[in-house]
Image (cartoon, grey):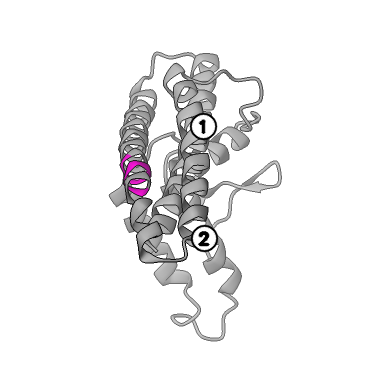
Amino acid sequence: MFLRRELRGMTDYFALLDQPRAAWLDPTSLQDAYHKKSLQSHPDTAPGRDTDGNFAELNKAYQVLQDPKQRLHHLLGLEGHDPSGAGESIAQELQELFPRIGALAQQANSVLEKNKAASNPLSRSLLKPELLEVEKETSELRAKLQELFEAAVAQLRQISSDRAQNDGGRIASLSKLYLTFAYLTRWSAQLDEIAFQLSL
């Protein structure tokens, strides 16, 4: 049985997978630690022992730590800070994306409804330019979100390597990044759904 570290009633997933408590983790090291620990506690490798709970907790730890948003939420929670981002201001680039994504969602819903209601091939073909416009905007916004996601991951790496930053500044930076990842994750899911609906 492995050591389970708990803090404030919360399992420390970093300790559980032998990882440093940091905003950025090396994906290969994390995956190797997960595979090693999961082999030790998988129910099939230890018949007769009650390892189901341990194995499920390892899976949960790995899911959380491999995802930047969930990792930051967990890290901030472990350190006693509200990870909700309440009261945080968001970056200008994200503020500029709000209206674009909202407008695209409305446009996509409208054109998809029209396409669904189209009763013949001619009326569907007349909608083709609108559909192509929505597809193009969706593709551009997905590329922009990917670019912002990669920039946020680079900031995580920078914060993790910056030993000179004081704790208050570090927490403020991590909270802001958590908020960034929360928006990017939500919007990516929304754009993925639009792209899926357009492909039907």
Where is the N terminus found, in terms of image quarters?
bottom right
How far across and down, in percent of the image, does residue 64 sit?
50, 50
Q: Label 1 crowding class (10 Å Cα cut-off): few <14, some 14-19, many 20+?
A: many
Asked whether 119 or 192 is in front, the reply is 119
Asked whether 50 or 106 is in front, the reply is 106
- Per the model, the C-alpha gap separating discs 2 and 1 is 41 Å
- Depicted 47 relative to depicted 185: above or below: below
How far across and down, in percent of the image, does residue 15 sit?
50, 47
Q: Which residue is mark 2?
A: 117
- Verify whether residue 109 appears in magenta: no
Asked whether 193 or 19 is in front, the reply is 193
Residue located at (43% from left, 14% from top): 165
User: On the image, which quarter does residue 138 sit in?
Assistant: top left
How far across and down, in percent of the image, does residue 26 sit?
32, 43
- The secondary structure type at the circle numbered 1 is helix
Residue located at (60% from left, 69% from top): 53
Q: Which residue is mark 1?
A: 178
- Verify whether residue 133 appears in magenta: yes
Amino acid at dot 1? Tyr
Where is the C terminus found, in terms of image quarters?
bottom left
Amino acid at dot 2? Ala
Tally of numbered tags: 2
Q: Which residues are magenta?
A: 131-136
Tell us which disc is closer to us: 2 or 1.
2
